[in-house]
Amino acid sequence: MSSPYNPFALSSNLHNHNLRVVPFNFSLIKKLPSFSNSIFIGSNSRIFHSSSKKGLSCFCCSMAVEVDSVSQIELQGTLNSSRAYWPSKYILAWNVDVGNGSYYLFASKTAALRVTNDGIEGYDVKIKLDKVNGGLPAHVTEKFPHIRGYSAFRAPANLDVESLLKCQLAVAAFSGDGACRNVTGLQLPGVIDELYSYDGPLGAVFSEDSISLNLWAPTAQAVNASIYRDPLGGEPLQTVQLNESSGVWIVVGPRSWEGCYYVYEVTVYHHTTLRIEKCFAIDPYARGVSADVKRTLLADIKSESLKPEGWDNLADEKPHLLSPSDISIYELHIRDFSAYDLTVSPDLRGGYLAFTSQDSAGVNHLKKLSAAGLTHVHLLPSFQFAEVDDDKKKWKFVDTKMLETLPPDSEEQQAQITAIRDEDGYNPVLWGTPKGSYATDPNGPSRIIEFRKMVQALNHIGLRVVLDVVYNHLNSSGPSDVNSVLDKIVPGYYLRRDNDGAIENSTCINDTASEHYMVERLILDDLKHWSVNYKVDGFRFDLMGHIMKHTMVKATSMLQGLSKTQDGVEGSSIYIYGEGWDFGEVANNARGVNASQMNLSGTGIGSFNDRIRDAVLGGGPFGPLLQQGYVTGLSLQPNDNDHGGKANADRMLAVAKDHIQVGLAANLRDFMLTNCDGRQVKGSEVYTYGGSPVGYAMQPIETINYVSAHDNETLFDIVSLKTATYTSLDERCRVNHLATSIIALTQPHASPTHSGENAAATAQPARFPSGAGWAAPRNTPQGQQASQAACGACLQPASMLRGMLPPSVLAPSSPPPNLSSPATLPPGTATSVGQNRPPGIPFFHAGDELLRSKSLDRDSYNSGDWFNRLDFSYNTNNWGVGLPPKDQNQNNWPIIKQRLENPSYKPDKSHIIAAVENFTNLLQIRYSSPLFRLRSAKDIEDRVRFHNNVPSWIPGLIAMSIEDGHAGASGLSQIDPKFQYIVVMINVQPTETKFTNPDFRAKSLQLHPVLSMSGDTIVKESKYEPSTGCFTVPPKTTAVFVEPRHV
C-alpha cells in the first residue's frame, strides 16, 4: 500500500482486529472544535489549566496516565501534553515502558486525532515503533542531556519524516493484551534541526529589481503574504502564495513593494490548541513594523535614504579605545534620559533624538562624564518590546503638578502611577527592530533613522554604545496573541519546554532555547544586524546563563571577525557581557553547557560580579532589607537589624573584607591570601554565606564590577536604607561615594597579599545554588517578587541565602564538608586566556553620581517616569516622591515611610553637585594611570599588593598598592610615564584612621593631583608621613596617593 507518507501495513493485532492504514487526502483540511481550557485527566478527575499568559497556550500535566480502564475524556487530555521527543530522524524518545507491549506513532494532516477506549482514532498514518536496547544514541543525549534516561524507539528507515512533521503527531503505548496504556504528543526541535537547519537568506532580501520574502517554517502546510500600502487599515494590494523549498517559504516580488507592509498567514498545526491554525504574523527578521506591530515594513536597511549624513564614516569616527581594559560603562534608560529634561524639545523628550540635542542638560552631563574618561553608555532595551504602546496618542498621563503637592510618604502617587504603568523593555516581541515608542513616528522608517542618529550623536561626544539584549525569553506565545511571533511560525520550536511539554518560564516567561540551531542562528544574525547596520559597540545579555555557552562563543567569534573593510565596523572593539546566573531548567548544564559564570573561563565574555556588590553594601535581594555591609555601617555604625550581636557583626565585617579582596584578586581559585583568621588559604577556600567558594577562576577573565544597576534599589536608596537612622545626610553622601570608589578605583586583578605574596584573576558572579530556580513569570502576581532577581542585574545568586541563615552560621571560617576540595569546572570549560583580556570593567547605574533616588522603589521596571526620574539640572535627586508601588514594596512600607517622611534624608542641590564632582574625579583618577587598568595576570601578580592584614589589621580599612617599574623595583617594566607607585586607602570607619606600614617608608607619596584640587575638603585632610610610612585617612574617605616618577 502506498501513500504520500509511505505508510506501512502493520502485521500486529491490537484490540483483536486488523489495522488499516489510511492515506492522506491533501485536499481536505479541517479544524476540530476548540477544547476547554480545563482537561480531566486520570481517575481522580484533577483539573489542569493552561499555563499560558493569555488564552490557551499549553497544558501541563506531571502525572502518567497508565490505568487499567481509560475513558475517552481522560486520555484526550494527554494529547495536550508532549512528553515524548523526536530528537533524530528515525529515533524517538519517551520515558515509558509497557513491558512486552507495543508502541505506535500516529499522524493526522487535519489534526483529527482523538482518543477512545480502543486507542487513537482519526489518524491518517499509523506507524509501528521498535524499542531500542541500550538507550538513546550519544548524539541525542549530547544535545538533549535532560532526556538521557529516556527509552529509545526506532521508526522505519523509509519513513517520510518531512511530511509527517506538518501533521498533528502522537505516540501511544499498548500493553501485551492490546489495551492502550499511555498517549502523548511529541516535541520536535531535534528532528527539525537535523532535517532543516538552514544558513541561507531570511527575511526581506532586496536586489536591484526585486524583493524576495524568505520565511523558515518547516512545519507549515501553507504560507501566504498580504501586501499593504499603509501601516494600518485598508485592503491588501495583493496576496501572494509562498513556495516551500527545504523548509523555507519563498516568494519574489517587485521592487515597488519597498515602503509597503506585509503580513504572513501561516497555516500550521499548533500543539497548544490541537488544531490546524491560520496564524497571522510579522516577520521574525523584520527591520521595521507598524505602530500596532501587526505589519512588517519593507525597509531596505542599506538604503541611502535611511542613513544620517556621514553615517558610512562613523566607523572611522568612533571614540578611541586602546584596550578593552579601558572600558567603563554607564547604564541608562532611553526614556529616563530626557523625559523630564526641559532643555529638550517637547517632541523629542523620552526618545532617540533627545541624544542629538547637543546643548541639553542631559547631553552636557554625558559630555562631562565622557571628558572625565567614561567610555560606554549601556542603553536599556531598545528593541521592539511589549507593554508600551508605540502610538503615543494612546498613552495615559497623570497630573504631575498635583503629585508634587503630595507628602513625600503618601500612598497616592504610587496608586495613580500604578493605574497607568508601563514597562522598561524586558518583554521582547522582536529582537531586530528598534522600539517605536522612542521614535517621533512609530510608522515608517523613522525609528531606523533616529536610532542611527542617536548612536552617531553619542559616538561624537566620545561615548560608545552598548545595547541591552534579551534573547532568553519572549513576551508571548501561542497562535493568536498579537505579540506572539516565533511561536506562530514554527510552534513549539523556539521556546524551551519541560518534560510535559509546557513552556519553561524560569527567566520570566516563555524561555527561548538557544540549544536549537535556528534559535541560535536568529540570535547570531540579530547581533550582526545591530553591529553592522546600527554600528553599536557592545551587548549586555540579560540572563545570559539561560543561553548556551556555544551560542555565546560563536557570537564572540562572529563579532570579533567583523572588519571595517568588509562590514563597515571594527569587530575587535565590540564588547560582550551579561548575567551569568545559573538557575532554573538550565542549572548545572541540564540542557547543555550554558553561559554561566562557572563555564565562561577563557571565552572573553564578561559577567556581573554580584559578590563584591553584596560584600560592599550588605545582604542581597532575599536577605533582610537592613542587613549592612562593608561601607554601610556593618559593626562600625550598626542599625536596628539583628546582626547576631557585636562579635558576629565584627566577624561579618572581617569576612566581607575577605570577600572584597578575593574579588579584587579576580576570584582566582588558587590565589593564596591571609584570611580574617590569619590562615593562609586559597581563594576557593573562602566561602560565601551560601557555601559556594568565592574564588573559582583559573585565569584572569572579564568581569563587570558593580554595586548598582537598574533593578533593585538605587545606590543612594540602598545606602539610605542600610545606614543607621542616626547617620547624617553628609555621611550618607560619603558612603555613596565610598561604594562608587571601590568600583572605579580598585584593581580588579589585584591580589590581597601577605609578605611578598600575590596572585591574580578576574571576578565572576556566583553560581546559583544547586536546585534553586524561578518558576513564576515576572508579570504575574506570584512572580512579582521572584522577578526582581530573575530579570536584570539584581539577581545575586551568591548571596540569596544571606540573611536567611542564623547568625551562628554566617561568615563561615571553615569549608563546608562538600566544598573542602576545589571545585571541578564542567566539561568543555576553557582553562586558558590571552594576556590582553580586559581586567575587569567598572559599571555604574545612571544616577549613581547624582545620588539618584527612586523613592526607595526596589524594582522600578514598570514604575513609570515618576519614580524613574533623572534630573540633569541637579535640582533634585527624586527622593521622597511618595511611597513606591505597593506590589513590590508594601511589606517594607513601614521602614520606607520612616525615611521618606524625614526631611533630613533629602539631599539638596549642593550635595548633588558635590557628588557629580566626586564621581568625575574618580573617573579622572582611574584614567590618569594605566596602573589602574593592568592588562595581564603577570602584571597583576608582580605589581599589586594589599597591606592591612592580621594580626595588626585595622577593621574597616583597605590598603592597596600598585607598583610600576623604577630603579628600586627589580624586574618590573615601566608602563606609566607619570607615576611609579600608587596607594589606595579606603577607610569606611566613621572616624579618622591612621595606618602605618614599613613597606611605605621613605617614599615620595602625595595626594593625587585630582584630589588635591577637588572641592572635597575632607579628602584633602589625608596625609602621608614618609619617615614612618604612616597614612592618615579621614572618616568615610577614599584617598589615592601617588609617587611621581623621578626623571
Image: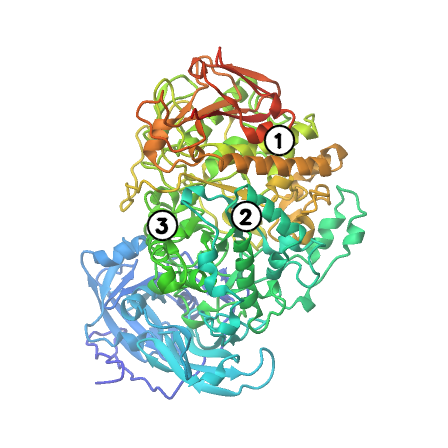
Q: Is residue 147 visible?
A: yes
Q: Position of residue 786 (x, y in %)?
A: 53, 47
Which element type, helix, strand or loop, lies under badge 3? Answer: loop
Distance from disc 3 to disc 1, alpha carbons, whole Å, reads 46 Å
Residue on which the image places disc 1: 1014
Examine the rendered structure and indicate whether residue 386 appears above or below residue 743. Answer: below
Residue on which the image places disc 2: 331
Distance from disc 2 to disc 1, alpha carbons, whole Å, reads 26 Å
**In this rendering, the label closer to the viewer, 2 or 3:** 2
Mark 2 and mark 1 in contact? Answer it, CB < 8 Å: no
Q: Position of residue 611 (x, y in %)?
A: 46, 35
Q: Residue at x 51, y 16 (%)?
A: 954
Left or right placement of residue 523 versus residue 984 in this view: left
Camera-side residue of 273 and 1009: 1009
Dot 1, how many residues are within 10 Å of its Cα: few (below 14), some (14-19), or many (20+)?
A: some
Identify which amino acid the numbered label 3 is placed on: Asn
Residue 594's mark? 3
